[in-house]
Amino acid sequence: MKPRIGIAGITGRMGACLRREVAATGAELAGGIGRPGSAGEFADIAALAAECDVVIDFTHASTVAAHAVALAGAKTAWILGTTGYDAAAAHAAATAGGVIPVVAAANFSPGVNLVLALAERMAAALPASAYDAEIVEMHHRQKVDAPSGTALALGEAVAAGRGVELANVIVRARDGHTGARADGHIGFASLLGGQIVGNHSLTFTAATEQIGLTHLAFDRGVFAAGAVRAAFWVQGRPPGLYSMKDVLGL
């Protein structure tokens, strides 16, 4: 059965992509909410949730906690693509996962999720004392968070492969006289310019070789397609906090 899908953030660029993807799949678009003051069909997330089987949410970090409460209250499944939210919002999403099925991902591209799986395996095989891990990304000039959710997910994958916590080894930027690079650090560099959808590269560099993984997104439609795929997959699932790895069977 095809789900009735609501879109949180329907008036944005991702919202436009999601509308097209929902139409292409033949699913029913119940409507959506937009930014405050914009022309969304529903007044708020609670009103939207009451009319949907699942809500796809690409909005803002500040909305995550409130959306978690509203969607759990309506017993409506949640596809959460918002990034950059804090620990309190993450806890709210996890709490919602005790009531409804939630698919939360930093990136809904199948290709990115395959890269994440490979990154973890490579990190486990390449000793941190010999192979320096660095992550470089570039996004459109309107991007407001850095490192991006996808870049951080790459870092988490490397850290998981090495059996460490990313928070203990992350280097978010280098400036000035920083001293020599320490073994085991995971470095990040974030670039902005033009209208690049999203470029991410992970390299493992040793004294004798370099191995890299790169993903280039050419169109936001790839994220919309993944999110709608997750909306179909989540139907009938028990409550829980799922990821795109679950959706893809990785």
Image (spheres, rainbow, N blue to C red):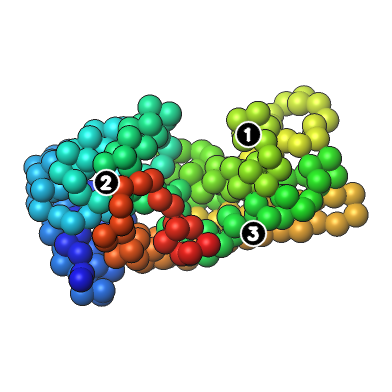
Q: Which residue is mark 1?
A: 165
Q: Amino acid at mark 3?
A: Leu
Q: Are marks 1 and 2 in contact (CB under 8 Å)?
A: no
Tell me if label 2 and label 3 are in contact, CB under 8 Å.
no
How far across and how far down the image is residue 203, in percent? 72, 52
The kind of residue tagged 2 is Ile
Residue under label 2, please give it: 100
Res. 164 image quadrant: top right
Instruction: Compare marks 1 and 2 and give the one earlier in the sequence.
Output: 2
Of helix, strand and loop, which one carries label 2?
A: loop
Q: CA distance from mark 1 to mark 2?
A: 28 Å
Cβ–Cβ under 8 Å for marks 3 and 1:
no
Q: Residue at x 45, y 48 (%)?
A: 106
Q: Is residue 180 left or right of residue 8?
A: right
Q: Examine the rendering and report whether any part of residue 171 can be seen.
A: no
Earlier-in-chain disc, 2 versus 3: 2
Q: Residue furthest right?
A: 208
Image position, residue 192 (x, y; %): 52, 46
Seen at 30% across and 44% down, the residue is 59
Q: Please name the residue shown 63% across and 43% down the image.
A: 160
- Residue under the image location 79 percent in, 51 percent down: 126
Q: Is residue 49 above or below residue 174?
A: below
Residues at marks 3 and 1, CA–CA distance in whole angstroms:
18 Å
SS under mark 1: loop
- Work out whether 219 lies above or below 51: below
The image's mark for residue 183 is none
Q: Which residue is mark 3?
A: 118
Q: Could you tell whether 208 is left or right of 33 in the image?
A: right
Residue type, label 1: Glu
Q: Position of residue 115 (x, y in %)?
A: 59, 59
- Residue in the foreground of this view, choosing between 61 and 143: 61
Q: Earlier in the sequence, mark 3 or mark 1?
A: 3
